[in-house]
């Protein structure tokens, strides 16, 4: 995976509220190409493993419970400066502080139920994508 790729999760809150199509449209309308996509329901163990870097933080247990509470959509996205551009598209982690017109401003309800995850660096994008997709499945 190169620097023109990033990783994203449409979180359980957005999936359960029926926002998957609108969010994917926003992503592709913003010039991102979908290089890989899968819908799945994380087990508690998978959520613990994926978020293990946060194990010592106070929000870890709640995050694991939330992320294993329903289906998610995981994607690898391609665009020039993908990480930076996607983080601009999704907005601040806190939807109350997110810029108007961003995905989180429009679809999130709070800091945890903030509709989407986006990698914060090319290195983390590679690590996160490889958790869900073998290289042969990323186009």
Image (tube, helix red, strand yellow):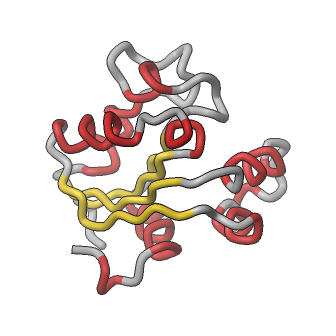
Where's the C terminus, which quadrant?
Answer: bottom left
| Residue in view at x 40 percent, y 58 percent | 7
Q: Is residue 120 visible?
A: no
| Residue in view at x 28 percent, y 57 percent | 77
Q: Is residue 121 visible?
A: yes
| Residue in view at x 55 percent, y 14 percent | 96
Count of labels in the image? 0
Where's the N terminus, which quadrant?
Answer: bottom left
Q: Quadrant of residue 48?
A: bottom right
- Residue 126 percent coordinates (x, y): 41, 69
- Residue 79 percent coordinates (x, y): 18, 53
* Residue 14 vertical position relative to residue 98 in the rendered view, above or below: below
- Residue 104 percent coordinates (x, y): 46, 27
* Residue 12 vertical position relative to residue 72 in the rendered view, above or below: above
Looking at this view, is 30 or 92 the one in front?
A: 30
Q: Quadrant of residue 106?
A: top left
Q: Indicate left or right for 64 with 107 as reference.
A: right
| Residue in view at x 34 percent, y 49 percent | 83
- Residue 129 percent coordinates (x, y): 44, 68
Q: Indicate left or right for 86 with 45 as reference.
A: left
């Amino acid at each position: 995976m190169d620097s023109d790729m990033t990783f994203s999760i449409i979180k359980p809150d957005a999936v359960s509220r029926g926002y998957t199509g609108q969010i994917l449209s926003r992503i592709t309308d913003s010039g991102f190409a979908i290089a890989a996509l899968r819908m799945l329901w994380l087990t508690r163990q998978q959520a613990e493993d994926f978020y293990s870097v946060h194990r010592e933080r106070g929000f870890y247990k709640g995050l694991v419970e939330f992320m294993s509470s329903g289906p998610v959509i995981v994607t690898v996205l391609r665009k020039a400066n993908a990480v930076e551009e996607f983080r601009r598209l999704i907005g601040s982690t806190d939807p109350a502080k997110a810029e108007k017109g961003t995905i989180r401003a429009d679809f999130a309800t709070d800091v945890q139920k903030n509709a989407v995850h986006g990698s914060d660096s090319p290195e983390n994008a590679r690590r996160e994508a490889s958790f869900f997709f073998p290289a042969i499945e990323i186009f």
